[in-house]
């Protein structure tokens, strides 16, 4: 049994990962038929069920920040997860990005922790499928993953990426070490001009991203 997660139902081999437990519930209701809670330990809500296409899928919260996400991913690997798509949020670094835009992440740059300065690519096959599912609804992008994000903006001199978040680099690097395929869709919640995405629009964007992630993972 893993040290952190305490599953009460079997996990699927494919998973959608979100930071927020509330978003895990939102996507479980949107993507799964008769979802069953598969974890509630440490407030890391997880759900497993079948998609309308008949595929087994787990939707698991990872908590806040890279260390928490990496720890949860290690537990998921022990529980049999082999492929995962992160559906998360980010802050724009590029002035061309607007709040609510979807980004299909091609590469994550670590700007904190032990891997600072390293770059980690998304799994090519999974990322290609994800991009195909999103089509013109998303643009390819790189993300810089920091230890913290502040309401006042991203601290200088972070410039190695189109956007900034707190988890993607940790997930991509940990996934590569574990032999897991990882990809990510991020929702821009704040632009460089500090345009903010409201909660309703954020939930709609997360649902659309979750649908694309589920389709990309479909066998």
Image: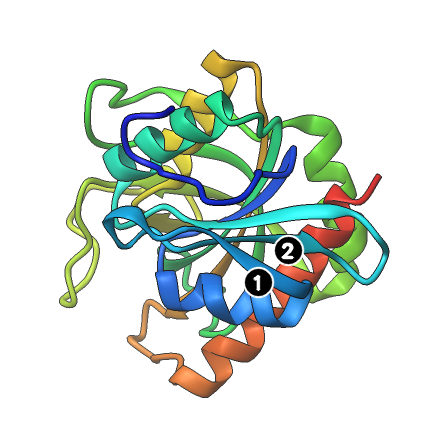
Q: Residue at x 41, y 64 (%)?
A: 95
Eyeballing the image, is 198 above or below 164?
Answer: below
Of residues 88 and 50, the one drawn nearer to the viewer in this rendering: 50
Residue 138 shows which numbered tag?
A: none
Of residues 199 and 106, the one drawn nearer to the viewer in this rendering: 199
Q: Which residue is mark 1?
A: 102
Residue at the far front: name it.
8
Crowding near the residue tagged with mark 2, few <14, some 14–19, many ≥20 C-alpha atoms within 10 Å: some
Q: Residue at x 84, y 53 (%)?
A: 54
Residue 76 percent across, percent down from the top left:
47, 31
Q: Is residue 18 visible?
A: yes
Label 2 near label 1: C-beta < 8 Å? yes
Residue 13 percent across, percent down from the top left:
65, 33
Q: Is residue 101 visible?
A: no
Q: Quadrant of the C terminus?
A: top right
Of badges 1 and 2, the one in the foreground is 1
Residue 22 percent across, percent down from the top left:
39, 68
User: Which tag, 1 or 2, sits closer to the chain's start?
Assistant: 1
Specify how the rendered protein is coloured.
rainbow
* Mark 2 element type: strand
> Does residue 134 appear left or right of residue 26 in this picture?
right
Q: CA distance from mark 1 to mark 2?
A: 7 Å
Residue 139 shows which numbered tag?
A: 2
> Does residue 205 appear left or right of residue 13 in this picture?
left
């Amino acid at each position: 049994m893993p040290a952190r997660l305490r599953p009460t139902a079997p996990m699927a081999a494919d998973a959608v990962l979100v930071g927020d437990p509330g978003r895990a519930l939102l996507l479980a209701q949107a993507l799964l038929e008769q979802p069953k809670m598969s974890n509630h330990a440490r407030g890391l809500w997880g759900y497993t069920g079948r998609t309308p296409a008949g595929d087994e899928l787990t939707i698991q919260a990872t908590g806040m920040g890279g260390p928490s996400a990496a720890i949860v991913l290690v537990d998921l690997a022990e529980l049999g997860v082999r492929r995962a798509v992160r559906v998360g949020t980010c802050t724009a670094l590029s002035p061309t990005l607007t709040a609510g835009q979807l980004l299909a992440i091609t590469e994550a740059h670590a700007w904190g922790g032990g891997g600072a300065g390293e770059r980690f690519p998304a799994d090519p096959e999974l990322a290609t499928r994800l991009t195909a599912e999103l089509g013109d609804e998303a643009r390819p992008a790189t993300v810089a993953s920091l230890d913290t994000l502040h309401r006042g903006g991203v601290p200088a001199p972070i410039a190695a990426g189109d956007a900034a978040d707190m988890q993607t680099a940790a997930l991509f690097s940990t996934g590569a070490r574990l032999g897991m395929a990882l990809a990510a869709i991020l929702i821009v919640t704040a632009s460089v001009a500090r345009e903010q995405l409201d909660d309703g629009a954020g939930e709609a964007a997360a649902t659309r991203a979750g649908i694309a992630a589920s389709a990309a993972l479909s066998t």
